[in-house]
Image (spheres, grey):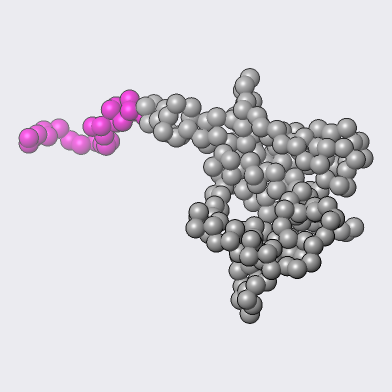
Amino acid sequence: MTVKISNKIVGYRVKKADAESNAAAAPDQTEQAPVKMNENIERPDFLLGTTYKIKPPVAEHAMYITINDILLNEGTDHESRQPYEVFINSKSMEHFQWVIALTRVISAVFRKGGDVTFLVEELRSVYDPNGGYFKKGGVFMPSLVAEIGAVIEKHLKAIGLLESEEMSETTKRILAEKRAEFEASQSSATNDEKSSDYPANATMCGKCSTKAVIVMDGCATCLSCGDSKCG
């Protein structure tokens, strides 16, 4: 439609026709946006918790690691479970100070939000100058801090923040057959108690840190994770 201007133009302004409708729609868009973990989220009255028990040989008593998770965007398509805080309890007082400091730092990182999976690699890279130890099952831990990192890794896999590398049923069957064949080929036997679930003369795996590598037909194969190298 054409409009004839009869008066002298002394000023102008641009009016957006959809300004009011956009303003009305803004609150709905804000409500639909998924809530992401950040340090401004207040601690709710209820958190989902999981407790893990470890008994490292370097500590006199067992340690109980509790990781509490917060549920974000509950009941929506964006629902997610995020770690919120961690506690470590034990009768041992020798590690009390640094354990408390470590839990507070880890909890602060959890509440900050973003990608917290880097904590696993950082903790598992800590080495004890006095040497590490083998935990039950023959898995080598370079330090107590590294085992705490392994627990956090297990928890992050359980809630879906880390992908779990599961072997196929075919790979499991092949490894079981290879293990049986290897054990049958060993003529020497021992009555000593085994600290590992794998053959006594197995060596350390560089991938999963488990004492489960055997050599058959020129191939070094890990019976734990399936890693194999032929020479």
Query: Residue 131, located in which quarter of the rendered image?
Result: bottom right
Pinpoint residue 66: horizontal percent, then vertical percent.
71, 33
x, y percent for residue 38: 59, 36
Q: Is residue 48 above or below residue 188?
A: above
92 or 74, which is in the foreground? 92
Residue occupying image coordinates x 62% and y 36%: 83
Q: Is residue 91 left or right of residue 106?
A: right
Task: Look at 70% across and 33% down and name the residue there.
Answer: 51
Front residue of this view, candidates 177 and 20 = 177
User: How many numbered markers are drawn?
Assistant: 0
In-image side of 8 versus 105 (left or right):
left
Residue 3 position in % (x across, y down): 9, 34
Q: Give x and y (percent) for residue 76.
A: 42, 29
Where on the picture, by quarter, is residue 98? top right
- Prevailing secondary structure class for the magenta stretch in the rendered image: loop
Within the image, what quadrant is residue 5 found in?
top left
Residue 131 appears in the figure: yes
Q: Quadrant of the C terminus?
A: bottom right
Is residue 11 depicted above or below 115 in this figure? above
Magenta span: 1-26
